[in-house]
């Protein structure tokens, strides 16, 4: 009677080695995915910065471009060393021009990389200043909703601004929902 080859019946030690190899491969794949995501965001930032640099050159506007990747998003800031009316014009009334430039920059990234971008563009600290203002709007709406017990509707705002307000309202312990469509989309804050 002959004994069959042990190649058909791997030993426990061989199974453990194979499982360890699989775990290492999975960890390398996960690290590669995280690395590729970070690399994609860095590429996105570079493409966006090139596009914006060219735009500033065409418009003959001075400004420095900073790129930062955080929380799975690329943040691009254009700042000037001194007060710049030209950069303020790129923000526009209520950030309308800034929103349009952000969308054009996202389209430029999409065209170059074939990936949709969620990059955030800021000019002269407008978004940071606006975030403080939005926090105050959320606090006032929460106070009014608690006092009156009635829902409080806020003025229409961009998706990015609504996200900031939703987060602030949640941190303050109330509920908020977006209502309406298009340019009229707004937040309603309620105690229930």
Image (cartoon, rainbow, N blue to C red):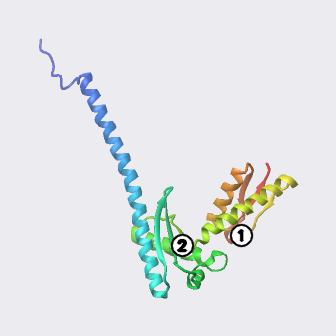
Residue placed furthest toward the right: 148
29 left or right of 185 in image: left
Please name the residue shown 15% across and 22% down the image: 5
Q: Secondary structure at mark 2?
A: helix
Please name the residue shown 47% across and 70% down the image: 66
Corner quadrant of residue 38: bottom left
The residue identified by callout 2 is 102
Where is residue 27 shown, x and y percent of the image? 35, 42
Which residue is at the front of the view, 68 or 25? 68
In the displayed structure, would residue 11 be above or below residue 123?
A: above
165 left or right of 43 in image: right
Where is residue 110 shown, x and y percent of the image? 45, 69
The residue identified by callout 1 is 184
Residues packed near mark 1 inside 10 Å, few (<14), some (14 to 19) or many (20 plus) = few
In the displayed structure, would residue 31 be above or below residue 46?
A: above
Q: Secondary structure at mark 1?
A: helix
Where is residue 104 shown, x and y percent of the image? 51, 75
Which residue is at the front of the view, 90 or 24? 90
Residue placed furthest toward the left: 2
Where is residue 178 shown, x and y percent of the image? 70, 60
Residues packed near mark 2 inside 10 Å, few (<14), some (14 to 19) or many (20 plus) = many
């Amino acid at each position: 009677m002959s004994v069959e080859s042990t190649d058909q019946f791997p030993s426990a030690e061989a199974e453990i080695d194979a499982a360890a190899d699989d775990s290492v491969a999975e960890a390398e794949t996960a690290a590669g995915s995280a690395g590729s995501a970070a690399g994609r965001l860095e590429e996105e930032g570079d493409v966006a910065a090139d596009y914006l640099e060219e735009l500033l050159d065409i418009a003959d506007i001075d400004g420095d471009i900073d790129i930062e990747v955080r929380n799975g998003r690329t943040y691009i800031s254009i700042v000037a060393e001194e007060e710049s009316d030209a950069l303020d014009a790129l923000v526009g009334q209520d950030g309308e021009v800034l929103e349009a430039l952000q969308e054009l920059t996202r389209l430029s990234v999409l065209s170059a990389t074939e990936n949709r971008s969620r990059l955030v563009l800021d000019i002269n600290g407008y978004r940071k200043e606006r975030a403080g203002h939005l926090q105050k709007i959320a606090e006032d709406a929460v106070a009014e909703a608690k006092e009156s017990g009635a829902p409080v509707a806020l003025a229409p705002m961009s998706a990015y601004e609504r996200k900031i307000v939703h987060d602030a309202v949640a941190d303050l312990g109330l509920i908020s929902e977006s209502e309406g469509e298009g340019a009229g989309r707004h937040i309603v804050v309620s105690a229930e």
